[in-house]
Image: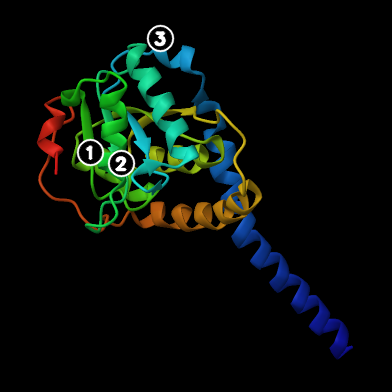
Amino acid sequence: MLKKRLLIIAAVLAALAAGTVFVPDIIVVSSTKDRIITADEAAELQNIDCVLVLGAGVRDGRPTPMLRDRLITGISLYESGAAPKIIMSGDHGREDYDEVNVMKSYAVENGVPDSDVFMDHAGFSTYDSIYRAKAVFEADSIIIVTQKYHLYRALYIAERLGVNAVGVSADLDDYSGQLKRDLREIAARDKDFFSCLFKPEPKYLGEKIPVSGDGNITDG
């Protein structure tokens, strides 16, 4: 009898643990999938403040393949008239590691005026990037650019923080290690699901830098 009770308790605990992991993941994906649109659909939108390109690493001063594809997609959206500005959001927390200047340089080298490219030097996480897009750069309506597996979480965060957002996938290639990223993303969705319940401030905020202005103010 005792053994049966212990098995029941173990089963209940396992079900609760599984629910804690997978229910937030399901909510994040199911509630945002309809806001992932094509580049052509994005070009038809009105009153978009900016394209937000999320960082994905640099190596030897060059964007990783995933980041390169995000940049190509973001630049294409800008060129189509989908938005008048681009925010490059990534990690520039150390002198020897700088995603955002690499991202801006890539855009400028590909024909985007430097004044239309803003750098968010404190985009240390997806949550921080989107929080700061609204709180620091005063962007209320944005197009988020990243790979599709990551877009669900980014769009969920935006919705919970009161940002009007759609997403355009930057999946222009197959990327090695994607299964590992997919598994990590489940945990990341769970973490940000609960972060969005409490809405903590990001690591850094600072003075407001309206995205309607000149992006060169963020140089550095």
Q: Residues within 10 Å of mark 2 (few under 14, many from 20)?
A: many
Mark 2 element type: strand
Q: Which residue is mark 3?
A: 44
Residue 43 point in image, percent of width and height: 40, 12
Name above or below for residue 216 compared with residue 161. Answer: above
Amino acid of disc 2: Ser
- Residue name at image x 51 percent, y 42 percent: 150
Badge 3 marks a residue whose secondary structure is loop
Q: Residue furthest bottom?
A: 2
Nearer to us of marks 1 and 3 is: 1
Label located before the other in sequence (1 or 2): 2
Residue type, label 1: Met
Residue 76 as seen in the image, left or right of residue 28: left
Q: What's the CA distance linking mark 1 and mark 2?
A: 6 Å
**Local crowd at mark 3 within 10 Å, few (<14), some, or many (≥20)?**
few
What residue is drawn where x is 30% and y is 48%? Answer: 123
Residue that appears at 44% across and 37% down: 155
For the residues bearing labels 1 and 2, Cβ distance under 8 angstroms: yes
Determine which residue is flagged by label 2.
89
Residue furthest front in the image = 60
Tell me which amino acid carries mark 3: Glu
* Contact check, label 1 and label 3, Cβ < 8 Å: no
**Which residue in the rendered view is the most extreme toward the right?**
1
When asked about the image quadrant of residue 174, the answer is top right
Secondary element under disc 1, as helix, strand or loop, is strand
Residue at image mark 1: 119
Judge by depth and name the residue closer to the eye, 191 or 56: 56
Of pointers 2 and 3, the one earlier in the residue sequence: 3
Image coords of residue 135 (percent x, y)? 21, 42
Q: Is residue 159 above or below residue 90?
A: above
